[in-house]
Image (cartoon, helix red, strand yellow):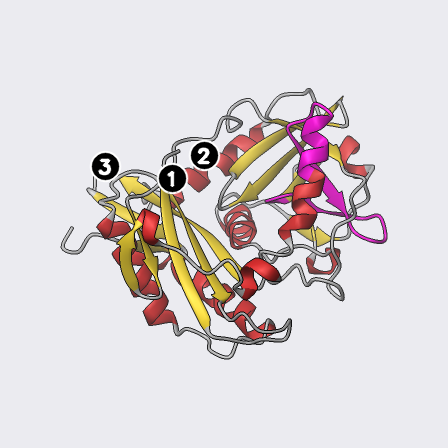
Amino acid sequence: MSTCDFMCLNGDIVPYGEAKIHAFSAVVKYGLGVFEGLRAYWNAEHQQLYVFRLSEHLERLRYGMKVMRYERIFDAPFLEDCLLRTLRANAIRENAHIRMIAYIDGDDELTVTGPVGLVIGVVKRGPGKFLQSGVRVAVSSWQRIADNALPPRVKSTANYVNNRAAELTARLDGHDGALMLSADGKLSEGTGACVFLVRGGQLITPDGASDILESITRDTVIQAARTVHGLVVQERRVDRTELLAAEEAFLCGSGQEVVPIVAVDRIAVGDGQPGPVTRLIQDHYFRLVGGQIADHPAWRTPVWPGQ
C-alpha cells in the first residue's frame, strides 16, 4: 500500500503534502467528520477502472452529514466529480482504496456546524493477506456502540475509537481481529466489517437492530446470495454461541472485501478452514466488482472516459 501523489481538498486537486487542515479545526478537536471507504477495481480486459457502488457510498456520506447537522451537504454530482478527478490525477490503473472525508473545519465550540470541508485520497491496494487463509478472531470485551449513543449507521470518524479499542485488544492478545457484541449481548459486527454465519446451508447475519453499520458490501452479498446462489438469508438477532455452532463464517466490507473466519476465541469454526459457501460468495464478489460478470452494470462507475 502506498500513498497517492495528489489529493482532492475542497474540490481542488493538490499535491499530497499540501492537503492540510488547521490543527484546531473541529474534526481534530471533536472528531466531527464522516467518511466513506470505497474500492476501485482494474479490469485488464476492458482497460477500465471501476468504482464499485459509488452512488450508494455517496448517499450514505450525505446521510451522515445530515445526521451530524452539517450546515452544508455536498450534492452527489460534486462528490462524484471530485472522486473521479482524484483517481485520474493519480493515474490509477490498478485496484485501489479510496477515502472520502467530509468534515467540519470551524474552530468554534462543540456545536459548530461549519464551514464544511472535503478531502479525498486514494491508495493502491492489492489482495488482503487473509483472503485465502482466513482470520482468527476474538469476541471483544469492548461493547459495540449503540444507536442512542453514537449511531452506527453514520460512518463517523469518532465512532471508530470503539472499533480501534476492540481491534487493538484482540491483536495484543494474539488474534487477527475482533468481533463485537451489542449492549444486550447479541452479535453485532467486526471492527471494520459485517459478519455472516453459515448454518445448514443458510446465511445468517445480524440485523439492523444489532447496532451494525448498514453496509453496502453486506447488501451486495445478501442480494447475490439470494438471487444468484439461491441461498436463504436470515437477517436477525444472533447469539454469541451461534458462532461456534456455525459450519462457516466470514467478514465482509469494502476494505476487507470477503474474508473467511476460521476461528473464534481460539475455537475452530467448522473444520477450521475456509468453507465452500464462503468461497462461493467470495469468488462471485470479486468477479462482480471487477466487471468480469455483467450483473448490475450500474454498480460499476468507469473512471477513464472512452474506454
Say which label, 3 or 1, has the lower sequence index. 3
- Residue 167's tag is none
Q: Which residues are magenta?
A: 167-194
Q: Give, as a three-letter code, the residue at label 1.
A: Arg
Q: Return the residue at label 3.
A: 44
Say which label, 3 or 2, has the lower sequence index. 3
- Residue 283's tag is 2
Q: Return the residue at label 1.
A: 287
- Rendered residue at 34%/39% (across/down): 95
> Hey, which quadrant is residue 46 in on the image?
top left
> Hey, which quadrant is residue 286 in on the image?
top left
- Rendered residue at 19%/42% (across/down): 47
**SS for callout 2:** helix
Q: Give, as a three-letter code, the residue at label 2.
A: Asp
Q: Give, as a three-letter code, the residue at label 3.
A: Ala
Q: Is residue 93 visible?
A: yes
